[in-house]
Image (cartoon, grey):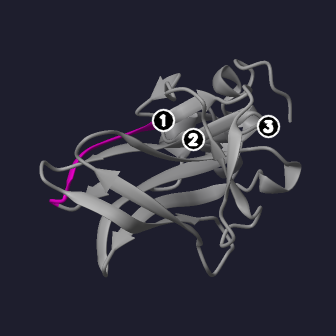
Amino acid sequence: MTRFPRLTALLLSALLSLPSALRAETIAAPQLSDRVAAVEWGIFCALKAMDRAPAPDTIAGWLHVPRDRIEFHWPDENVVPASIGLAFGIRVIAAPGEVTANAEARIYRPGRARPETWVTSITDSGEVNSFFRFDEEDELIPGIWAFEAWDQGTRLYRVEFEVVPAAARPDIANACGATS
């Protein structure tokens, strides 16, 4: 009986020493329809000013519109520290010959029954970004977030991210000069 507490402590210590990505919730692999040629995902510092576009079916009522091409500072990374000024999302290009002018972009936040939605286009002639930028403390919600696009009842893609406390990913959370 005296060994059990020691074993429990050793197992807990081993678990806590694992990299945070290994402790993360199960994140599904990106899912693409044959109408999508490629998708990239990642995390980026989003401290620069951006324009806005109306998006009435989002919580804020608008979307950030970057003035320049987004560069993922942490490409292929989908475990995101909850930190003001960080953003995460996807870049997609349609398969050759595909043009979708009125697709519905969706973002699913943990704890919400309905996704936030807006109209987007996906073409084979250029990249389209969908991302979320942490601007307010109440947006720092841990759990699985998902980005999707739908066109006429067909899901074009789904990419998941896990948002974790900033302390779980200090290498990223502290890299942009943002504080939460």
Magenta highlight: main SS: strand
Whether residue 142 is visible to the viewer of this picture, yes or no, is yes
Q: Which residue is mark 2?
A: 88
Real-space Cα distance between discs 2 and 3? 12 Å
Across and down, in percent, residue 141 comes to 74, 56
Query: Which region shows up in magenta?
Result: 34-41
Q: Amino acid at mark 3?
A: Ile
Quadrant that contains the C terminus = top right
At horizontal 77% and vertical 50% (from top left) the residue drawn is 140
Q: Residues within 10 Å of mark 2 (few under 14, many from 20)?
A: many
Q: Earlier in the sequence, mark 2 or mark 1?
A: 1
SS type, badge 1: strand
Q: Are marks 2 and 1 in contact (CB under 8 Å)?
A: yes
Whether residue 29 is visible to the viewer of this picture, yes or no, is no
Q: Amino acid at mark 2?
A: Phe
Relative to 91, does residue 31 appear above or below in the rendering? below
69 relative to 149 in the view: left or right: right
Whether the magenta-drawn stretch holds residue 102 is answered as: no
Residue 84: image tag: 3
Q: Amino acid at mark 1?
A: Gly
Across and down, in percent, residue 21 comes to 51, 38
At horizontal 31% and vertical 39% (from top left) the residue drawn is 126
Real-space Cα distance between discs 2 and 1? 6 Å
Q: Residues within 10 Å of mark 3 (few under 14, many from 20)?
A: many
Tell me the quarter of the picture where residue 166 sits: top right
Across and down, in percent, residue 151 comes to 33, 72
Q: Which residue is mark 1?
A: 42
